[in-house]
Image (cartoon, grey):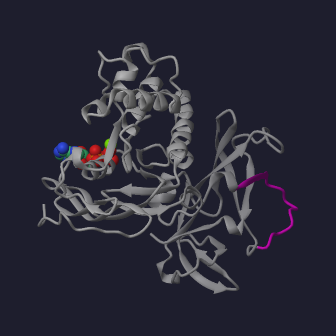
Amino acid sequence: MQASNTGDTNTEPGICLEVRNVVKRFGDLTAVDHVNLKIREGEIFSFLGPSGCGKSTLLRVVAGLENQDLGDVFIAGLNVNDLPPYKRDCNTVFQSHALFPHMTVAKNIGFGLVERKISKSEIKKRVAEKIELVNLGGMEDRLPEQLSGGQQQRVALARSLILEPTVLLLDEPLAALDRKLRKEMQIELKRIQREVGTTFLNVTHDQKEALSVSDRIGIMNAGAFLQIGSPDEIYEKPRSIFVASFMGATNIFTGNVVSKKDGRIEIETPDGLKIFAPEPEGCAGDAITGFSVHPELISLESATADAPPTDPREQTEFHGKIKEVFYQGDFSEFTVALKETDMLMTVHLTRGKGYRTQLPEGQDVTVSWDYGSNNVLTG
Ligand code: ADP
Ligand code: MG
């Protein structure tokens, strides 16, 4: 680790966790690569990225379970570089909850307070509060093995929250649960966080989970953050090919800006497809590398010979043939082979009003979408 900075403080108001220029290497592998990050008081911030991108390593550096090779970590304004995990003002909930198997729910939850030498009556009161918080009323005397996976995770949460940390670190706490229970616990996680107001730093590789529980998301790849923003910013305005494809904007085109007028830019792909997109603020045209469009924003119609031409400045329209249809229940995914190029596009049609079941494989179709749905990529 670099020269000690303990005692150094960082008192920027509203920021309860700061990571400054942190690097963590394992031999030749740089797991965390010069990361800077500020997490606000009271928010749920998620690290989202593929397996192996460095999410857990960064969380473990914050917790003090790994020592960084370079950089600083501040919790509640205090540089904690040289503090061991138990002296840092944070607690961690892991995927495997590691409850004490021979202790009841109540004893597990109160354990940390016993260690802190708090009076028995005070412990009893606080344990009862936390049991209510996580909805485990009536289960105080059960042993962990008598609980479901979701209930065990509630105990783990209560056991950490009772210590009133400034930041609660959560490393994929819901990953081992089945889909339905995971959804239920995502809602619970957010409700509990809103009730206690503690800052949550949540690690996940599940896009849907990050979108539904977070105030802000940091998309990680190869040890670095590629984009940080609110769930709707990350989903609707991914800035790079990686983020767009990771968030499911499967229609990604590379291209250059060929014209710029009236708040619109025109992008041309190497195959000669041209589209218009809203001109992004504060972005030089030469930084633009292409565009993306989400499959659910695209309309799909049978091609008709006498269709009136559309204004490309308002509507993007391509022609193609349906290659494959994947039935998904609530929606169907169509793969369309474009006539203009050898690219494939993905279109999602949600079951409901206007849903067309009569578009078979091999059908000639027109795909179209509002020009404003074209999201400009810069990396
Ligand atoms: P994530 O949590 O995003 O899946 P990790 O932070 O666990 O990723 O791992 C990041 C990279 O660091 C991976 O390539 C992983 O194999 C490597 N790594 C993690 N911990 C160690 C370790 N203790 N020793 C060596 N390599 C490690
Ligand atoms: Mg991990």
Decide if residue 200 is in sight here. Answer: yes
Is residue 309 magenta-colored? yes
Q: Nearer the viewer, residue 118 or 260?
A: 118
Residue 77 sits in quarter: bottom left
The location of residue 108, given as percent across then percent down, is 34, 25
The location of residue 45, given as percent across then percent down, is 45, 53
Task: Give, as a single range, the part of the protein colored magenta.
Answer: 298-311
The location of residue 176, given as percent across then percent down, is 41, 29
Quadrant into which the N terminus falls: bottom left
Q: Residue at the location (46% across, 19% down)?
A: 148
- 353 relative to 33, above or below: above
Predominant secondary structure, magenta span: loop
The location of residue 288, given as percent across then percent down, is 50, 76
- 224 relative to 184, above or below: below
Q: Is residue 377 left or right of residue 91?
A: right
Decide if residue 65 is in sight here. Answer: no
Is residue 130 magenta-colored? no
| Picture mark count | 0
Q: Residue at the location (42% across, 13% down)?
A: 146
- 154 relative to 193, above or below: above
